[in-house]
Image (tube, rainbow, N blue to C red):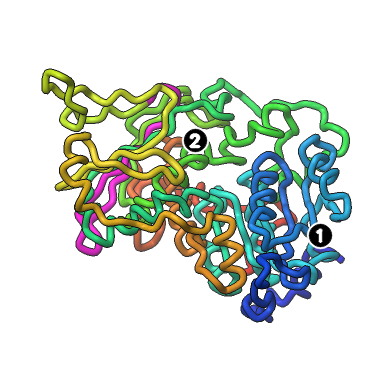
Amino acid sequence: MNRRTFIKGSGVAAGTFMIVPSRFVLGQKSSSGNLPPSEEIKFALIGAGRQGIVNMKSMLRTQLCRLVAICDADLNHSLPKKVMKAHPEVPAFTDFRVMFEKMGDQLDSVVIATPDHAHFSAAMLAMSLGKHLYLQKPIAPTFGQCERLMKMAEQSNVVTQMGNQGHSGANYFQFKSWAEAGVIKDITRIDAWFCGDNVLNLRGKPFTDYPSDPVPDGLDWDQWMDGAQMVPYSEQIHPRLWRNWYNLGGGAIGDWGAHIVDTAHRFLKLGMPDKITVVKREGVNNFVFPKASTLRFDFPAREGMPPCELNWYDGVGNTPTIDTEYGNLDTSGQRVPIELKVDSKGKVLYGKDLTFLGGSHGDALRVIPRDRMKEVHASLPKFPSKNSDHFKNFALACRGEEEARSPFSIAAPLCQMLNLGQIAQRLGGELNFDRETNTFANNEEANAFLDPAPRAGWEEYFHMV
């Protein structure tokens, strides 16, 4: 069965979906706290590398889920081998299309933790078949792919959750509570940064072409490339360095933006900027992300909130300067500036009445300076501290018992905003974005990067919605 026949047979071509709400399919949790096999959420893991293993273990830890299929284009790699050794009873595949063909009727949900460029096709197919979907951030590397994923999630009526785990942490509940209570208000400037190296140590390297190495035994490189335009296999791409490359990953902003600015983007209702300005760009290259960059996103006034600028910093040591007036008092009563570590990550939100400093993921905000925090502490709203984590929230949402906290309706616009920043990092200059037409008004080259075509053979996933 070829891809086209399989997809047509799934009902996608006719736009029909036979999806029963999960609470009727999966039943209720038993009084003992353990689910019988008939009520477990059966999931497939696509992408059994480092993040995939973390996600798999987290799903199993909920005690609501059971792993029933493994898929990875490089099953000979040590990490997928470790997963298969730990779960010898679970069938393994190199091609997600074959997995769905053989195992589709045994799956309730899918967890995807492949490299960014390989998210879209498997995610579209999974949702089209009525499978609930946990998809690692960012949900896709391009604006157009994010748009299609959001539409497919709405059309298929499945539960979706993007893997920005902090969106079920303290910062989520705190930001939501404080914004609704009017504590976080009139934010006119946000400084956000990720200034570590992580696995982005190829940034700014003077590549003149893609490097090439012999393909290792057991690696299906064509399958690994998925719908991206084909490039040679290289140890400087797979298994860990793919995030550096424009056509495969999202750089630092794609990696960390969804962990740092997610709550601000959601609860301040930022949407899309109308202008992105490249303030700094070091180590420019046509293949990999800059060594360091500073971007300014300008958001217009919206729903009673003032215009807001978001300044993004990445690159080792490329940190913002926090205004001295927000530093803590020393013994002599003088303000001491807050010094950020050269490899730090976090955000500052400057408001009319209060200013907030936070980290990444679920790290809670604190009011700065410290003496101002002491003044307002007693009046700050309480927020719930005992909540399901991101994976249990997804599992409970599949059962109809909670709502997913980072569904594609929320996650896709965030990823689209970050994608606009990636395009700016690539081209430099100033880009004016039309929020009505979702196009750049002053740069046709930038428009070409919004929704690049897939390589031949992968087009059908682009035409499902």
Q: Provide the secondary structure element on which disc 2 rests.
A: helix
Q: Height in image: 4 above or below 429?
A: below
Foreground residue, 234 or 24?
Answer: 24
Quick check: can you spot residue 269? no
Foreground residue, 51 or 332?
Answer: 332
State the residue position of label 1: 99
Question: In which image quadrant can residue 270 be found?
Answer: bottom left
Answer whether labels 1 and 2 touch (C-beta < 8 Å). no
Residue 62: image location, x then y, percent: 64, 57
Q: Is residue 319 left or right of residue 69?
A: left
Q: Is residue 307 magenta?
A: yes
Where's the C terminus, which quadrant?
A: bottom right
Q: Amino acid type of disc 2?
A: Ala
Q: Residue at x 58, y 40 (%)?
A: 249
Q: Which residues make up the magenta segment?
A: 296-318
Q: Residue at x 72, y 72 (%)?
A: 39
Q: Height in image: 247 above or below 98?
A: above
Residue 227: image location, x then y, percent: 68, 51
Q: Is residue 383 left or right of residue 251?
A: left
Q: Is residue 206 left or right of residue 290?
A: right
Q: CA distance from mark 1 to mark 2?
A: 32 Å
Foreground residue, 32 or 152?
Answer: 32
Q: Residue at x 33, y 43 (%)?
A: 365
Quick check: can you spot residue 315? yes
Residue 359: image location, x then y, percent: 39, 38
Q: Provide the secondary structure element on which disc 1 rests.
A: helix
N-terminal of the pair, mark 1 or mark 2, is 1
Q: Is residue 314 magenta?
A: yes
Q: How busy is the neighbourhood of tag 2: few (under 14 within 10 Å), some, or many (20 plus)?
A: many
Q: Amino acid type of disc 1?
A: Met
Point out which mark residue 252 bears.
Answer: 2
